Image (cartoon, rainbow, N blue to C red):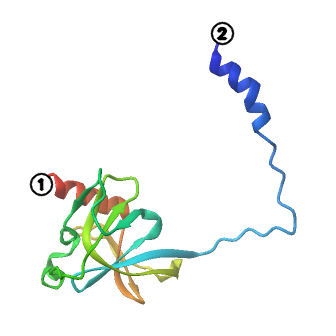
């Protein structure tokens, strides 16, 4: 006798209702918009998809390893990434036990998907996948940034 099998056979059929096809009055929208969080590290502006962020806080969250955000700055811009007193936010990445901070949050923006100017393959900073022109920002990829933060944390 399988208890879970009995449970699901007794109750699952009641919980599942057939999905009817959408009526002609229902429209399906592909928003073709992407939300970005724009933040600064020193004088440099970065953007990260809002869906790639779990939280933004004024203090490091417990259970997350926060790294100095300058580890993601290209070496040629290291001088421009000098920390200033106005940087007081910590960003935790979705699905990863890593984040970065302190940084300064600029704005939360919504842009068309084609606003991202994709970057050619980059071997030195693969976590920077492109740029935005308005506002001028370097766009980060969560998975590649997370891998870089993990390597930096264990270096």
The quarter holding residue 90 reads: bottom left
Quadrant of the rendering where the N terminus is positioned: top right
Residue beneath label 2, please?
1
Residue beneath label 1, please?
155
Q: Is label 1 or label 2 in front? A: 2
Q: Residue furthest top?
A: 1
Q: Position of residue 118 (x, y in %)?
A: 40, 77
Judged left or right of residue 61, residue 74 is: left
Q: Earlier in the sequence, mark 1 or mark 2?
A: 2
Element type at marker 1? Answer: loop
Q: Position of residue 40 (x, y in %)?
A: 29, 80
Element type at marker 2? Answer: loop
Q: Nearer the viewer, residue 14 or 136?
A: 14
Quadrant of the rendering where the C terminus is positioned: bottom left
Point 40% across, 53% down: residue: 95
Point 12% across, 83% down: residue: 79
């Amino acid at each position: 006798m399988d208890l879970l099998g009995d449970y699901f056979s007794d109750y699952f059929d009641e919980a599942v209702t057939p999905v009817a096809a959408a009526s002609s009055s229902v429209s399906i929208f592909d928003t073709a918009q992407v939300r970005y969080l724009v933040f600064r590290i020193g004088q440099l502006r970065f953007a990260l998809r809002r869906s790639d962020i779990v939280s933004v806080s004024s203090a490091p969250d417990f259970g997350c390893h926060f790294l100095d955000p300058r580890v993601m700055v290209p070496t040629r811009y290291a001088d421009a990434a000098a920390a200033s007193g106005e940087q007081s936010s910590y960003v935790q990445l979705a699905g990863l036990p890593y984040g970065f901070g302190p940084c300064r949050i600029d704005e939360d923006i919504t842009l068309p998907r084609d606003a991202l100017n994709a970057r050619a393959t980059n071997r030195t900073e693969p976590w920077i996948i492109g740029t935005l022109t308005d506002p001028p920002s370097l766009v980060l990829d969560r998975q590649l940034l997370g891998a870089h933060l993990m390597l930096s944390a264990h270096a």
